[in-house]
Amino acid sequence: MRSDEVVSRATLDLAFIPSPSLIPGESHLRVYLNDEMMGVVPIEREQLGNKSRVQVPLDPRYIGDFNRVKLGFTGHYQRICENPVHSSLWLDVGSDSALSLRYQALPLKNDLSHFPEPFFDSRDNRPLILPMVFAASPALAQQKAAAVLASWFGARAQWRGQQFPVLFNQLPERHGIVFATNDQRPDFLRDYPAVDGPIVEMISHPEDPYVKLLLVLGRDDQDLVTAVTGIAQGSILFRGQSVAVAGVRPLAPRQPYDAPNWVRTDRPVSFSELQRYPGQLQSAGIEPQPMALTLNLPPDLFMARDLGIAMQLKYRYTSPKTDDGSRLVVSLNDQLLRAYALKPEQQSGEKLLQLLLLQDESGDNQLTIPALKLGTRNQLRFNFDYVNAVTGGTPDRCETYQPIPNRVVIDGDSTIDFSGYRHFMAMPDLAAFANAGFPFSRLADLSQTLVLVDRNPAPAQLGALLNALGTIGAHTGYPALGVRLGDDWQQEKDRDLDLLLIGAVPAELRDNDNIHLLLDATQSRVKMPARQVSRPDLVPDSEDDRPESEARIDSEGPMAAVIGFQSPFHEQRSVVALLADSPRGFQLLNEAINHSDRRAALSGSVAVIRESGIDSLRVGKAYHVGYLPGGNESGLRCPRTRWCWPG
């Protein structure tokens, strides 16, 4: 529950289907809220085998910051000598069950000691929607301040998603951010006192005391950048209604691939470093719930052929009584790696406290992960599957056994090692941009990224910039403090930086052979490949991807696009362009950026976004970024060129 809301009424609308073999009246469902019983739902005869709906009131006094609703099922199929795990004992809860909650807003003090609340609340699992307000179309420095702040909030929101609607000289209807200088501020701050430096202040909404505004104030635009830098790197010191940012200085530069959300690739990483919450690597029950770890990797980590990732795995478990086939199943991205037997105690009176997962023929106790199954985002999963033998009785000799819950633990000292691998990949790859913000996220602070924007951008264009930077921040877990913004292609084109274009392709690049889609107000042009591959994750094929035709289309309908191509000035640099032909086109673009399921459709070198959905193409010659050493390392062939590839 958010800190600025309280629940005044809560109801569980429960849909379920009980087994038709249950004894009515004696079978029932228990409803708990935070381990407090809220009610009992008896199973009636007419409900057996049929879908039923009931409403169970939940006492809002037991609702706290983080809450859990638990359902307990007690079922009987005969009155004596039951088998507790008989196949007829089941009840299915429908996915259309829902919680109905009535909220009441709470008045909050203007106190920054709780920042980033209420603008972002970690208790809220909904997407972050945070309006950003400007007096008018902002200059570059103001845009940078907003972009850095959007990336900082994106790093907080992470999996929730984030949106940053842009308003010019207009009050937001919810918690929002306002950028203002002494000379340029929205009308509702016209009488606000002038400031003498970078200031961050929280005030109440002029028309709604339950809504808060975060003011980012300064004498000029550069003060706004300083204030935002103070938020990104010093908010732990915030308190009171207003703070002044005296200054922020970097102590050490960011290093490539050191994004906080990515697994370290310079040394072995322990599982305890990868845990997101306490108890993630523990489970208990007759059938313990699976345990999982998420592994976020740089998209360009080159997994050489015939090599694997070493994982030193330690675990503890309740020993089965006999050698009955109980096992630990290890899987990666829902693909089976291996299964290992859970052995009973070897000596009477002793407990098996720790086992190494694999005792292979070489005796090095390591589990090797097939590297080719790894992607940008991976899930390593551990299932402890027990054979639970439960004996039922007969009316003459009634003997049953109550199953004892099993306890299993994956030791946090287990390690996985991605060190020693090079960085090298084929580009353009819009999936790498969509799923990891690559190549811009190579440095987490985007210090080797230039964003080229239009002069005097409209709210929709500025929103595309903020949403894009917010999404990259969510991928890396770090704000884009080093990003550079420009609006003059002639001044910026020769910089040795990766380029992110917002709104349009510069006129000087429109005849570039590597640009396979152009988009104007009502005209569009696209080059089609000789053969469209069904799986964009396949290795690029120059014959399939070569442009075969070019189509020009005139239409009034909205459209957006994302294209990727090699920088015409630096062979190791890349360009990603976010294009739209209208305000509605920018809405489509923002929806594609903000929603993870739509971002998943971005791949190849060209993605066309229309009302009907997203279509991606891989067209044109591939290029490579990164470096592989020469010689015969890792089974590579290296001709007399700079690049090597698997042989």
Image (tube, helix red, strand yellow):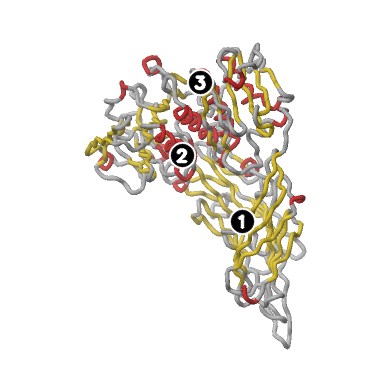
Quarter occupied by residue 514:
top left
Which residue is denoted by mark 1 in the rendering? 98
Q: Residue placed at 50% from the left, 26% from the top?
A: 446
Please provide percent x and percent y for residue 150: 55, 29
Q: Which mark is residue 591?
A: 2
Q: Earlier in the sequence, mark 2 or mark 3?
A: 3
- Label 3 element class: loop
Q: What's the amino acid at mark 3?
A: Ala
Percent x, y for residue 226?
60, 18
For the residues labelled 1 and 3, say whether their Cβ atoms are less than 8 Å apart. Answer: no
Say if 379 sits above or below 221 in the image: below
Q: Say whether residue 301 is visible.
A: no
Residue type at mark 1: give it: Ala
Question: Looking at the image, which residue sits at the far left?
Answer: 549
Residue with the mark numbered 3? 136
Question: Which quadrant is the C terminus positioned in?
Answer: top left
Counting from the top left corner in percent of width and height, residue 119 is at 63, 33
Q: Report the Cα–Cα distance between label 1 and label 3.
A: 43 Å
Residue drawn at x 33%, y 30% as measured from the top left? 521
Residue 605 appears in the figure: yes
Tag 2 secondary structure: helix
Q: Nearer the viewer, mark 2 or mark 3?
A: 3
N-terminal of the pair, mark 1 or mark 2, is: 1
Looking at the picture, does residue 495 appear above or below residue 345? above
| Label 1: which secondary element | strand
